[in-house]
Amino acid sequence: MTAVFVFLLMFAAAFLAAGLAVSFAVAVSYVRARRGGNPAFLEEAEITALPAILKGEEELSTIRVWGRLLARIGHVHTLRKHIEEANLDWSAGRVTMGMLLAGALAGSILSMPSWMPAWVAALGALGAGSAPYFFILRRRAQRFRKFSSQFPEALDTLTRALKAGYPLASAIELLGMEQPEPLASEMRRTRDEWKLGTSWDQALDNMANRIPIPEVRLFAAAVKMQNRIGGRLNDVLARVGEGMRDAAVLESEVRAISVHSRMTGMILTFLPLGILLMMLVVNPEYVMVLTTSPTGRTLIYCAIIANIAAHFLIRRLSRIRM
């Protein structure tokens, strides 16, 4: 009975932790958009905060009660957008349920030992409950990075197609057939929206919202400007592609410079664990003193927290924004 109660308690705690994780990510993105002056993201953030019922969207979960509950939480729609941007065939209901179950299970397991402090179990539940969402963010960032690396070559292909006399729709259709994923699927989706009656301006804006990276926004702005005032689009796209290629080279050089700091952070993170394992092999009694006394266990907990905090601090300091 106690185990069931602990599981339910951890389930509720994981639910709150999952909501806080998504809310924190949305708040950070919103602040960055305010600082960077990105009105498109600000408008999008206001739209995604609307309930799903007002926007006529599909159900958030196959479980009707769970879907209605999620529909009352505005940030869940941001979670679903992140899932779509990561190109994962998951529903928001499945992800949130997985986050809750993972957090509740981790908290229940960590709370079973009598010597385990409650705050350690709470931190474990928070970490396990947030892990699926951070996995989605990682997949999303990887997809955007891959799209960004493919985009300059795609612009070169588009420029050559326009010079050969292809209209814009046929040139984009050519990209959808010849380019690799994820760029090909986005180009096909943009072409399909235009064929269904959406204007080029709106179709390009939709693509910029699905792939919110500077390269796509610059491409959309160039095409929309050409549609309004005229001019040779192939020359404009050639210059845009050249600038993107130079920026990609600069970014790769910056990554090469910062990789030393990231590797140092990884070594410093796992070095204490390696030393602990060596001491367990050489002289186990020397280490067991820490596990048998309350002061020793407190020192172990503090060392784990400090090590994790130092790892993320080093990663933060070694990250160079361009």
Image (cartoon, rainbow, N blue to C red):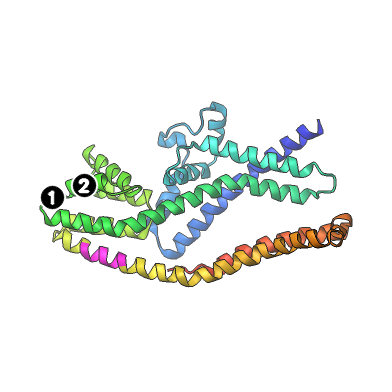
Among numbered discs 1 and 2, the one appearing first in the sequence: 1
CB-based contact (under 8 Å), mark 1 and mark 2: yes
Q: Is residue 262 left or right of residue 40?
A: right
Question: Residues in magenta?
Answer: 238-245
Residue 19 appears at what percent x and percent y? 59, 45
Q: Is residue 67 above or below residue 118?
A: above
| Residue at the image position 57 percent from the left and 39 percent from the top | 96
| Residue at the image position 61 percent from the left and 62 percent from the top | 312
| Residue at the image position 42 percent from the left and 54 percent from the top | 42
Residue 256 appears at what percent x and percent y? 45, 70
Q: Looking at this rendering, what residue extends furthest in the front direction?
A: 282
Residue 321 included in the magenta stretch of the image: no
Q: Tag 2, which secondary structure?
A: helix
Q: Which mark is residue 166?
A: 1
Mark 2 is surrounded, within 10 Å at the Cα level, by few (under 14), some (14 to 19) or many (20 or more) other residues, namely: some
Residue 205 appears at what percent x and percent y? 31, 50
Main secondary structure type of the part rendered in magenta: helix
Whole-angstrom CA distance, mark 1 to mark 2, is 10 Å
Image quadrant for the N terminus? Answer: top right
Q: Looking at this rendering, what residue extends furthest in the left direction?
A: 165
